[in-house]
Image: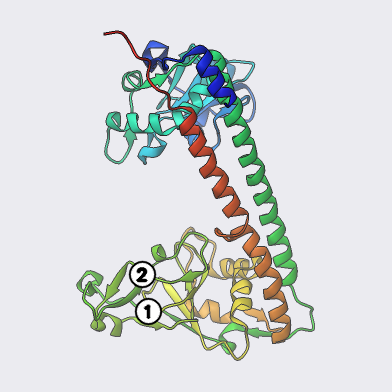
Amino acid sequence: MSRIDELIAEHCPGGVEHQPLGAVGEFIRGNGLQKKDLFDEGFPAVHYGQIHTKYGVWTEETFSFTLPTIAAKLRHASYGDLLIATTSEDDEAVAKATAWLGNTDVVLSGDAYIYRHSLDPRYVAYFFQSEPFQEQKKRYISGTKVRRISGSSLAKILIPVPPLEVQREIVRILDTFSKMEAELEAELEARKQQYEFYADQLLTVERDIQRVKFGDVATIVRGASPRPIQAFLTNQADGVPWIKIGDVPAGGKYITTTAQCVTPAGAAKSRRVKPGDFVLSNSMSFGRPYVSKIDGYIHDGWLAISNFEQYYVRDYLYYLLRSKAIQEDFARKAGAGTVKNLNADIVRSVVIPLPPKEDQERVVDLLDRFDALVNDISTGLPAELAARRQQYEYYRDKLLTFKPLETAS
């Protein structure tokens, strides 16, 4: 029997009482603090947006501060209070919370609540992450583009309230999982930095290596868009793949499928790419190369790169185009404005190294190993991290699900 089972058998064999959050605490709305009021020193302060991006289950210090004169006018959270962001553009992030464990008070912005309660603070914060909480909150979220939940609605959500000793044991176990996950995240980040360093080293060639204009060793052309595109989209069997940015997985290398197809007439007005050709974005993921594994067609937000095989090993060219030096050259030539335009002439003009193919293959072999370690979701560190997260989520939800206390009728 596990320690949790022992504690439950000892303290609550008949089940655990479930109470509304409002019955074991109170929700206090944050007020007044704006982004312009945040500084690098002063009185500890948290803006609701930072809860989404910077804080985990609990924290002992803030990333931002405000002036004491401003803090004096705001509502304060104390040790053990929960800081809750109550608005977001996606439902899952609504009511993201972090427990404040600092040794001073902290002030909180609007669009957020302070939850002052009588439970273990980290236990409550873990509960706010759990599936039981997420399922209950769905019925209370409102709004269209900006989704939100009120303090009065949060107060209605039921939380299991086991004895404090059980709460603390649950926190101990989940903290252990969180620590392992954090260690893996740190290792993955360190490996990514190491990968980028060695990639730059391996792709920086000797001065006596031949250099060529990219356009002299490859065919580089802009995509084309049949217009209006809606008139050419089709679900018919004779449709051909229509490649868009959204068809490429985040951080992915290959284009393997598309969400939409165009008619043969639309294809005739577009630009064809064959398996093995590169497509290069000149818009959203600026300058990012991808390798097509399908026969498809691209719009004018892409460039197509082909007929390079005489000079380059495909994977070497992929790594070369992703390298810091080439990406910086793309950006510099595309201009300094907010909207950069990476057109075909610019890409053709970029001067790139052309080492012997045996050297290219050696570099590919080394970088493939690093790449698998830091990016492969099936074998590398990302796979291990994903497995840890899945394990953590399973045990978190299991540990925070209790048999309700049976009451006499």
Q: What residue type is labelled 2?
A: Thr
Q: Which amino acid does label 1 sit on?
A: Gly
Identify the residue at the far top of this view. Answer: 408
Q: Quadrant of residue 206?
A: bottom right
Dividing the image into 4 quarters, which one contains the N terminus?
A: top right
Q: Is residue 378 above or below residue 224?
A: above
Residue 258 got which mark?
Answer: 2
Identify the residue at the far bottom of this view. Answer: 310
Q: Name the residue under label 1.
A: 296
Give percent across and percent down for residue 79: 57, 15
Q: Is residue 400 left or right of residue 312?
A: left
Count the marks: 2
Give percent across and percent down for residue 394: 49, 38
Q: Which residue is drawn at 29% across and 28% down?
A: 140
Q: Between 215 and 59, which is closer to the camera in this rendering? A: 59
Residue 102 got which mark?
Answer: none
Give percent across and percent down for residue 98: 52, 27
Q: Which residue is drawn at 59% across and 88% down?
A: 217
Q: Can residue 283 be seen in this view?
A: yes
